[in-house]
Amino acid sequence: MNNQKNSKFFLWFGILIGVSSTIFLFLYQLAKKNKNSFSNIVDRYINISSDDKSTELVTVENEETKSEIVKDNLKVIKGIGPAIETLLNNNNIFTFSDLGSKSVEDLENILNKKNLRLADPQTWPVQAQQAAKNKIN
């Protein structure tokens, strides 16, 4: 009788291990596959219209040079408002290309320096790349 209880326990334990490892493997493969298709989600669900993409000429003064660049309206990116746009401009991010070339970790560091931890920059580079592509077309 005791041997039968042990065998049932090990049977259910084996089934639990097998099912949970299969689920974890499936989720890992899904996350790995979707890492590159993140831009597809942005393309499908976040529409950046060309009407809101106003640009302006801004003079940027570095220690060595003084140059003029065309500044994009970064507020068209979902999650970026006037305060975050100003913070990004203070960190020499003026255009969609600048924002698209930054990593999410860099953007999180910029936000954390000003205690803006509630802002989520996960999709900002992809949205900026899409906006830059739409601006060119």
Image (cartoon, rainbow, N blue to C red):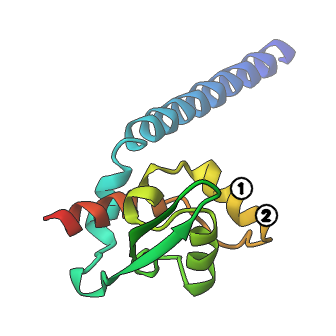
Q: Nearer the viewer, residue 92 or 53?
A: 92
The residue under label 2 is 113
SS class, disc 1: helix
Q: Which residue is mark 1?
A: 109
Residue 119, quarter of picture: bottom right
- From the top left corner, tell me how far across and down residue 65 is, in percent: 54, 57
Q: Amino acid at mark 2?
A: Lys
Whether residue 17 is situated above or below residue 63 in the rendered picture: above
| Badge 2 element | helix
Quarter occupied by residue 114: bottom right
Q: Position of residue 99 (x, y in %)?
A: 47, 59
**Residue at 79%, 63% in the rendered image:** 113
Q: Given the image, on which type of amino acid does mark 1 rest?
A: Asn
Quarter of the figure with the N terminus:
top right
Left or right of 81? Residue 76 is: left
Spot the residue most to the left: 137
Q: Residue furthest right?
A: 2
